[in-house]
Image (cartoon, helix red, strand yellow):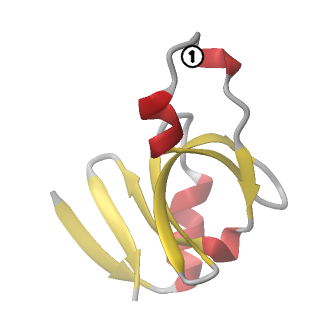
Amino acid sequence: MTVKQVDEAELLAQVGRCMFGERVVIEREGKRFSARIQHVGATGVKVVPETTLMEHEGEPGDLNGVTVSYGDICEVEVDGITYRLA
């Protein structure tokens, strides 16, 4: 897997290209967690933490995600490339 160090503008451009299910790393209150994108919106990204997905036994569409700010995203995987905030 290729990892690219990018600035905030490039990271946000890559997040804008994301589809449902792409992996992101979120940093909030000094803690990091990985999540899968549910929806990319105008003011933020709705994600489902991967720990929630692992513990979930229901139908794929019945999970409610959390909306996070674009500023909370520090890494995103798109087309096999990981874009990491430098």
- Give the quarter of the image for residue 39: top right
Number of dots carrying numbers: 1
Work out which quarter of the rendered image holds the N terminus and state it: bottom left
Q: Which residue is mark 1?
A: 60
Depth check: give the residue in front, 2 or 31.
31
x, y percent for residue 45 = 70, 53
Crowding around mark 1 (Cα neighbors within 10 Å: few <14, some 14 to 19, many 20+) is few
Q: Which residue is depicted at the point 56% across and 58% down?
A: 15
- Give the quarter of the image for residue 3: bottom left
**Is residue 47 rendered to the left or right of residue 10?**
right
x, y percent for residue 68 = 72, 61
Q: Which residue is depicted at the point 33% across and 82% down?
A: 5
Single out the residue that lies furthest toward the top.
Answer: 59
x, y percent for residue 14 = 51, 61
61 shown above or below 39: above
Q: Which residue is depicted at the point 63% across and 46% down?
A: 47
36 shown above or below 76: above
**Is residue 48 rendered to the left or right of residue 79?**
right
Work out which quarter of the rendered image holds the C terminus and state it: bottom left
Depth check: give the residue in front, 34 or 51.
51
**Is residue 5 rendered to the left or right of residue 18?**
left
37 shown above or below 53: below
Depth check: give the residue in front, 67 or 7.
67
Q: Secondary structure at mark 1?
A: helix
- Disc 1 marks which amino acid? Pro
- Give the quarter of the image for residue 59: top right
Single out the residue that lies furthest toward the left.
Answer: 1
10 shown above or below 1: below
